[in-house]
Image: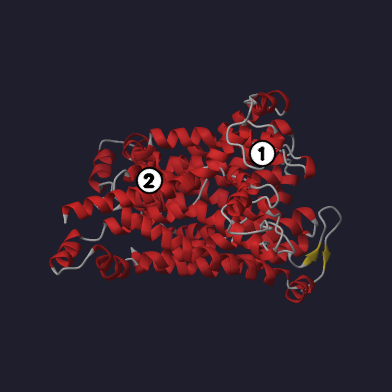
């Protein structure tokens, strides 16, 4: 029986290593292609390690395509979007979890409604509103629609429910205003929730494509995902540059997940199951 | 006076806390949506004055079949990927939660990576991999002798749908696996021990204990995938641009093309309304399932 289990364990390990290789294959091909000359990408038989490592695929992005700025734009939208989203969602979630007030049901109905009206169904009017307000080609325009999300509010509400009412009452008796209670009592308790939801928000914003590609125009305002796509141009598309751009957008994420795999997976699991 | 202020700040606090959400809701959800309803009754190409055309757009939509085609495409892609994805996710989750499996943390991470890395980047890699004449996938398939001629992955309607389905499986298996892992880990160990005492092997206890208990969670995953398939955008947009012959045009790709390529803003709004109704029905089903699940 024990030998059987051991054999099974080894066989399954080999099988899973094979499957893992399939899942990692596209990333390996991406990294390999990012160092190739364009003709080597489509070579037959396939080339894994190019004759010469073309680091200029990367430097060219920075010198000709302003990728330094593009990376900063991506970081800016992801960080501000995440912080703003966490702040607004936690406040709303706290209010829904811990207060009774007139119109609570109606306001919660709005949260549900925003869950059911996907942004994709109002692309045209949003674009027109943006155009009339002069918000086209502005990084702020990418962030603003994502500052509150129904998912985030649900998540924070769920987490706030675990806070004890006695704690809040005691602070009120000590003379804490409600704003102070949020900042001094509630926010510190929510730190683990901020971490989990923050990872989700950051990843979503970093990879966000549809809305940014509609409103961002000039090269110095693009985010990474849009800038990579902007390299595509008919037959003469520089696929080697697209691959090096992709490496720039993917590799930091890969390193982060392997270093913090426990925290990230736990956070995301908790996040998706709760929300 | 002090007392009155105190009472006021207590009473009004929840409204202040919710105010940012309400403002965002009005500007980014309610106004655009109402405007969308209005635009759906007009003919408008973005610049000139809008012409009120009544139900003409709705008539066009029902007649032209573009929208139905996009729904059918989504359903076909859904059928191609959901069974495979959920089966894989369930098998991965079941194996990774056993005591004899090694390196579970590593595998979990590897399967999950495609879900958190940039869709645009991954779609472009697959664009290279699927390339008919020089793509590595065709080179592998042909050198293994599985096919004599390269498959026109992105150029024939069915293979294009299969390509999108493969990309979606790649991106979402890990996510569903994580959801299912949560479910499997909440199943009481004593059930498996009892089965073992009764002489059940691993596969039997998977079939008779794990699977039945996971039914609701699997239904939940299926609904999430349905919502996801109808709003699929980046993957077909980059792989095929919605083609060939509209074979991979999902509703969102259709909305995008009509509004920002063909500049039929009025007609695009009509499609958006239909898309909204579809998504609303699906979200209601999801909420219902989820509430019961809770």
Q: Is residue B14 visible?
A: no
- Depth check: give the residue in front, A81 or B239: B239
Residue highlighted by disc 1? A41
The quadrant of the image that shows the N terminus of chain B is top left
Rendering quarter of residue B30: bottom right
Q: Residue at x 64, y 59 (%)?
A: A121
Residue B277 sits above or below residue B10 on the image? below
**Of A78 and B32, which appears nearest the observer?**
A78
Q: Residue A166: give x, y in percent of width and height.
A: 23, 46
Which of B273 and B50 lies nearest the eye of the viewer? B273
Query: In the picture, residue B221 is in which quadrant?
Result: bottom left
Q: In which quarter of the image is the C terminus of chain B?
A: bottom left
Labels 1 & 2 near each other (Cβ < 8 A): no
Element under disc 2: helix
The answer for which chain carries disc 2 is: B
Residue at disc 1, secondary structure: helix
Say yes or no: labels 1 and 2 on the same chain. Answer: no
Q: Answer yes or no: is residue A65 visible.
A: yes
Label 1 Cα neighbours within 10 Å, binned few <14 / some 14-19 / many ≥20: many
- Please count the marks in the image: 2
* Residue ID for mark 2: B107
Residue shown at 55%/44% (left/top)? A26
Q: Position of residue A78 (x, y in %)?
A: 54, 37
Q: Is residue B294 above or below residue A28?
A: below
Distance, label 1 to label 2, CA atoms, is 29 Å
State the image coordinates of residue A253 (x, y, percent, origin top left): 49, 36
């Amino acid at each position: 029986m024990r030998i059987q289990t051991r054999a099974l364990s080894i066989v399954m390990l080999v099988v899973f290593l094979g499957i893992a290789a399939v899942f990692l294959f596209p990333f390996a091909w991406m990294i390999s292609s990012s160092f190739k000359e364009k003709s080597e990408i489509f070579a037959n038989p396939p080339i894994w390690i190019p004759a010469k490592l073309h680091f200029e695929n990367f430097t060219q992005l920075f010198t000709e395509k302003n990728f330094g700025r593009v990376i900063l734009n991506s970081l800016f939208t992801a960080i501000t979007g995440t912080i703003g989203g966490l702040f607004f969602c936690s406040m709303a979630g706290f209010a829904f979890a811990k207060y009774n007030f007139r119109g609570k049901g109606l306001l919660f109905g709005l949260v549900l409604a925003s869950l059911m009206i996907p942004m994709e169904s109002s692309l045209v009017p949003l674009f027109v509103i943006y155009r009339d307000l002069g918000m086209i080609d502005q990084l702020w325009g990418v962030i603003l629609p994502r500052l509150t999300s129904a998912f985030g509010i649900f998540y924070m509400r769920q987490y706030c429910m675990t806070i004890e009412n006695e704690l809040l009452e005691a602070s009120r008796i000590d003379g804490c205003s409600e704003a102070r209670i949020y900042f001094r009592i509630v926010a510190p308790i929510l730190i683990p929730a901020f971490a989990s939801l923050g990872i989700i928000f950051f990843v979503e914003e970093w990879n966000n494509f549809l809305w940014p590609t509609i409103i961002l125009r000039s090269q110095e305002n693009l985010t990474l995902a849009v800038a990579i796509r902007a390299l595509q141009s008919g037959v003469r598309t520089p696929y080697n540059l697209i691959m090096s751009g992709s490496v720039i957008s993917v590799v930091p994420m890969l390193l982060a997940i392997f270093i913090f795999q426990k925290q990230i997976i736990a956070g995301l699991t908790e996040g998706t199951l709760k929300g | 006076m002090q007392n009155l202020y105190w009472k006021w700040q207590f009473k009004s606090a929840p409204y202040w806390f919710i105010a940012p959400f309400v403002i965002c809701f009005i500007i980014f959800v309610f106004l655009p949506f109402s405007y969308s309803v209005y635009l759906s009754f007009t003919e408008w190409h973005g610049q000139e004055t809008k012409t009120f055309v009544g139900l003409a757009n709705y008539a066009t939509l029902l007649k032209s079949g573009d929208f139905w085609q996009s729904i059918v495409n989504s359903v076909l892609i859904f059928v191609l990927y959901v069974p495979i994805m959920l089966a894989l996710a369930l098998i991965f989750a079941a194996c990774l939660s056993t005591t004899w499996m090694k390196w579970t943390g590593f595998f979990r991470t590897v399967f999950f990576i495609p879900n958190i890395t940039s869709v645009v980047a991954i779609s472009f890699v697959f664009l290279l991999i699927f390339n008919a004449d020089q793509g590595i996938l065709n080179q592998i398939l042909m050198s293994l002798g599985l096919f004599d001629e390269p498959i026109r992955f992105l150029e024939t309607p069915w293979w294009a749908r299969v390509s999108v389905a493969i990309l979606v499986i790649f991106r979402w298996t890990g996510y569903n696996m994580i959801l299912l892992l949560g479910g499997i880990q909440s199943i009481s160990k004593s059930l498996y021990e009892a089965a073992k005492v009764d002489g059940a092997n691993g596969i039997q206890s998977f079939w008779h204990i794990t699977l039945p208990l996971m039914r609701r969670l699997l239904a939940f995953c299926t609904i999430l995938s349905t919502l996801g398939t109808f709003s699929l955008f980046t993957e077909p947009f980059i792989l095929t641009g919605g083609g060939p012959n509209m074979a991979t045009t999902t509703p969102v790709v259709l909305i995008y093309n009509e509004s920002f390529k063909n500049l039929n803003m009025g007609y695009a709004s009509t499609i958006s309304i239909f898309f909204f109704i579809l998504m609303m029905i699906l979200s209601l089903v999801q909420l219902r399932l989820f509430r019961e699940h809770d």
